[in-house]
Image: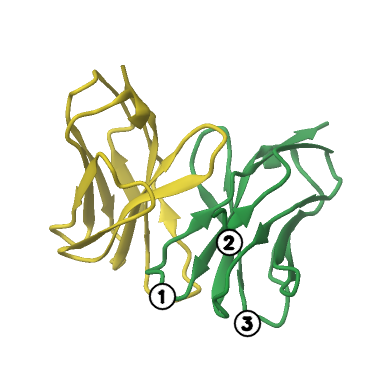
Amino acid sequence: NAGVTQTPKFRVLKTGQSMTLLCAQDMNHEYMYWYRQDPGMGLRLIHYSVGEGTTAKGEVPDGYNVSRLKKQNFLLGLESAAPSQTSVYFCASTMVGAADTQYFGPGTRLTVL
Amino acid sequence: AQKITQTQPGMFVQEKEAVTLDCTYDTSDPSYGLFWYKQPSSGEMIFLIYQGSYDQQNATEGRYSLNFQKARKSANLVISASQLGDSAMYFCAMRETDSWGKLQFGAGTQVVVTP
């Protein structure tokens, strides 16, 4: 049982390049989330999904797209990276119950030059 | 508007002493959940403790306890008998009803435990 995994762990991009971050969970969780963490700030929600084939915008969705083609996977895409997207990205998943905590992946550190 | 406020950016605490981390929240939802996470320097997010808005008793998990004062909208984390391994960033988060499980985080409190 690996929990929540993220690929890659580190990445450096040039402005304008694109990339996809992969999140996978093996806990059969319905809900999945992408957050970003910037220095001095808590985590902010980018996009989320409440089930296979569904996605929705969070607090800071601009510049990102997501897809949930399989229940266990949640992809975060940057079509044209900008320096403002330099951040640590966390994926999380949870069951549906109110008391269920979110389980987080180890994070991806992205630098956009 | 900021829904979770952590007013202490950083704290020093001596080993074996207790420390209280402040968290206040803002919601009009009668049903909500409050969470505390620990983020050590290695970067992962570790769940510590959960408090539901209708829970009658304060939550406890080992050395962690949550001082829940509903009328004051405060959910302070108490770490008893601090250890060097408790040095980390601590985040308070809230989940409201019908929010699809989304968490709203505070800015965090950096705790440094000294020998």
Q: Between tags 1 and 3, which lies in front?
A: 1
Q: Which residue is mark 3?
A: B54
* Residue under label 1: B98
From the image, state the color of chain B: green
> Mark 1 or 2 closer to N-term?
2
Instruction: Using the image, tell me which numbered label, if any, was put on residue B35.
Output: 2
Q: CA distance from mark 3 to mark 2?
A: 14 Å
Counting residues from the N terminus, which is met first, the one under dot 3 or under dot 2? Answer: 2
Which chain does the numbered disc 3 sit on? Answer: B
> To which quarter of the image does residue A19 belong?
top left
Q: Colour of chain A?
A: yellow
Report if residue A2 is visible in the image.
Answer: no
Find residue B109 and report its horizontal and vertical position in percent.
67, 42
Going by the numbered disc 1, the residue's amino acid type is: Asp
The residue lying toward the viewer, choosing from B67 and B105, is B105
Q: How is the image coloured?
A: by chain
**Which part of the image, by quadrant, shows the N terminus of chain B?**
bottom right
Q: Amino acid at mark 3?
A: Tyr
Residue occupying the point 50% across, 66% down: B95
Residue A64 horizontal side relative to residue B11, left or right: left
Q: Residue at x 13, y 58 (%)?
A: A69
Label 2 is found on which chain of the structure? B
Query: What's the chain of the residue with tag 1?
Result: B
Mark nearer the N terminus (1 vs 3) = 3
Q: Secondary structure at mark 1?
A: loop
**Amino acid type of the residue tagged 2 in the rendering:** Phe
A49 in relation to B98, above or below: above
